[in-house]
Amino acid sequence: MLSARNRLDGEVVEVETGDVTAEVVLDVNGEEVAAVITRESAENLEIEEGMEVTAVVKATDVMLRSD
């Protein structure tokens, strides 16, 4: 069980893998959500396009910017 309450179910639409990290882009109800995780985690989870996953958001603060 996870203690984080902010969970976003979505479909993986893009995976860009680098030497150390992987950027995973999800389609969550028509909106894109991107996560940067370690390459090892992406490989262990066998993340690939078309896969259904849940993004779990746990943060102590959120910063906003207005132009």
Image: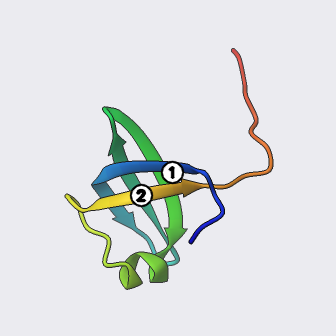
Q: Nearer the viewer, residue 13 or 10?
A: 10
Residue extending furthest toward the right: 60
Q: Residues within 10 Å of mark 1 (few under 14, many from 20)?
A: few
Residue at 29% of width from left, 54% of height from top?
14
Asked whether, in this view, residue 62 is left or right of residue 3, the answer is right
Which comes sooner in the sequence, label 1 or label 2?
1
Q: Residues within 10 Å of mark 2 (few under 14, many from 20)?
A: some
The structure residue drawn at horizontal position 33% and vertical position 35%, both measured from the top left corner, is: 29
x then y, percent, for residue 61: 79, 44
Above or below, 29 against 5 in this view is above
Residue holding disc 2:
54
> Please, which colouring scheme is shown?
rainbow
Mark 1 lies on a secondary structure that is strand
Whether residue 3 sits left or right of residue 32 in the image: it is right
- Residue 55 is situated, as x and y percent measured from the top left of the image, at 47, 56
* Quarter occupied by the N terminus: bottom right
Outermost residue on the top side: it is: 67
Label 2 sits on what residue type? Thr
Quadrant the C terminus occupies: top right
**Residue 47: numbered disc:** none
Choose top left, top right, bottom left or bottom right for residue 23: bottom left
Q: Are marks 1 and 2 in contact (CB under 8 Å)?
A: yes
Image location (x, y in percent) of residue 39: 46, 77
Q: Which residue is mark 1?
A: 7
Please give left or right for residue 38 compared with residue 67 in the image: left
Residue appearing at x 41%, y 58% in the figure? 54
- Give 53 or 2, whichever is nearer the viewer: 2
Find numbered disc 2 in the image and state the secondary structure of the residue it sits on: strand
The three-letter code of the residue at mark 1 reads Arg
